[in-house]
Image (cartoon, helix red, strand yellow):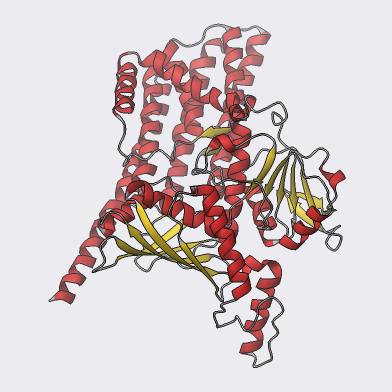
Amino acid sequence: MTERRQRRRIRDRARIQSSLSIVPSLFTVGNIFCGYYSAISTLRGNYDNAAIAIGVGIVLDALDGRIARLTKTSSDFGVQLDSIADVLTFGIAPAILAFSWGLNSIAGIEADIAKHVHQLGWLATFAFVVCGALRLARFNIQTKKPPDAGSKRYFVGLPIPMGAAMIASVVHFFKQPILLVGSALLWCLLILFLAFLMISTVRYHSFKEFDVRKPRPRRALFITAMLLGLIIFYSEVMLLALATIYVSSGLILYAMNRERLRKSPNIAIVGSTSLLGKELREMLEDGGFPMGRLALFETEEYAGLLQEFAGEIQITQVISPESFVDIDIAFFTCSPEIMHSYVASGAKFPELTIDLTQAGSEGTVYLQGISDPRLLRSKGYFVNPHPAAIVIARVLSSLHNRFGVESAAVTVLEPASERGNAGVDELQEQTVNLLNFQQIENKVFNGQLAFNILPEREASERTENRVMEHLEGILGKTFPKPMITAVQAPVFHSHAFSVFVQLLGTPAVEEVTAQFDRGDGSVTVPAAADGPSPVGVVGTDTIHLGRVRHGGNHPGAYSLWLVADNLRIAAANAIRTAEHIMLAPAFDT
């Protein structure tokens, strides 16, 4: 009977999931209808109705993505359908509206200037459609790749719905078509400017961290209600104001950067051929991180190597203090040994340095989202926390804020990539040699790692001490210190964590899981019942929560299984730190 009930529950859940999967697509279809209706209304001369239809489409477009994430029914089909809908509703429909409303009335004027402006209108509206499609193509490519540091909080380039919103809000405000040639010229320039913003690297807030499931203060609910009321009664003024503020916000943030960082900063990656250096370089490129020049540095052994970045070939240079003269931000991703040699040489560090080497150098340990932002300065030496410390700090901090943490014990399964290229190469060679019945060599590890687990006492103690040191810097000295045990696992990439935590309360397992699910997005709760694995999370910059289990007869005791890509999660925090420094100049007081 029990097995039959379980099978019935599984079938019922499958039916519910299948039913829910169609809901986001219905909103997307509604979005397509809005685009179609807008185009038909424009052709009939009902410009205000066309503008309102685009506005309704924007609401539906915002809802379909959020509903898909809430119901965990996101799919590649839904992504492609949403892109097609966006091109129609926010690309073609606004372009037709912009041309008809702004340029049709001057078509009959025989003056040469009117003809030139009319031709410019053709070019401007077509450019709007093309740039919108390019913006969507870039967005789709970025979403297929693991999210970069800025992709969750910021859009790279003006989102096409907001470009359409700007056009629709202007039409809704003025209603009557443009009759003067000068006004039509300004209208064409505005459309071209919106097209340029869509393909630019100017960043706009995505508001993706806004979680509707989180309880909201009464003040926030009051402000939201007042805003909706103003939009209903004064839609013309409010919608134009909101669209203008959003379009301007990216430019304002860009202009607010400090004088030294107002231009795109010059970036240096020291140790660019290391695993962490390559990961950082890839994330900077994929995320559209604004930069002027990228300099790649290495030891003399690797100097002269050719590396590609953003379609251009970069030549690796030798590390030297003179090389940092015009560098604004330097990321150190080299091995601890190279870092120790650089420190021992007495050479100066760049004014703004972010250290990812885990060499033990003194500096400000900073974890974005948990550390106090007031620690950031436009000049300083910042230590990127150990990737294991990043995971443990985020998880324990989330639990402590909600339930209170009394004690914790964590077993960290370290990947070979924590030993750099040499560690990965040795694990691969050991695996191949064992499968071919050949002798193995161990220069990096203290024995056979392939198909085995090594205690690696010296390396483990070094890792444990470093993680504890960084946790104290992030969470403070009063936070209950967890017991950390590190062992070397036979995997190439990604940390795995077995966490035992004693909470002050005894919440249900579902409540503990929900705490991470409703968080800031740094922890992912997979829908699959089997849970995450080190291989499965490679290329992602979030922590993946697996099984959560209650301690049975021990009240408040819970065990958790966590996995995270060690390289990606470290690089992501370093980039977020640099972004926060660039976008928050007021902190340097």
Total numbered labels placed on residues in the image? 0
Measured from the top left, where is residue 21 in percent x and y?
31, 52
Q: Is residue 541 visible?
A: no
Measured from the top left, where is residue 290 in percent x and y?
66, 38
Viewer-closest of 177 and 274:
274
Q: Residue at x 59, y 81 (%)?
A: 450
Query: Residue lying furthest left in this view?
Result: 1
Q: Look at the picture and state if 283 lies above or below 111.
A: below
Q: Is residue 550 left or right of residue 588?
A: left
Q: Look at the picture and state if 217 lies above or below 390.
A: above
Q: Is residue 477 visible?
A: yes
Quadrant occupied by the C terminus: top right
Query: Residue lying furthest front in this view?
Result: 478
Viewer-closest of 359 and 232:
359
Viewer-closest of 148 and 544:
544
Question: Which of the 4 image quarters holds residue 252?
Answer: top right
Query: Residue lying furthest bottom in this view?
Result: 437
Question: Which of the 4 image quarters holds residue 202?
Answer: top right
Measured from the top left, where is residue 375 in percent x and y?
58, 37
Question: Which of the 4 image quarters holds residue 353?
Answer: top right
Viewer-closest of 388 and 198:
388
Measured from the top left, where is residue 237 in percent x and y?
41, 13
Q: Is residue 71 left or right of residue 581?
A: left
Quadrant occupied by the N terminus: bottom left
Q: Look at the picture and state if 326 lies above or below 504.
A: above
Q: Residue at x 43, y 46 (%)?
A: 81
Q: Look at the picture and state if 300 lies above or below 102.
A: below
Q: Is residue 319 left or right of residue 176?
A: right
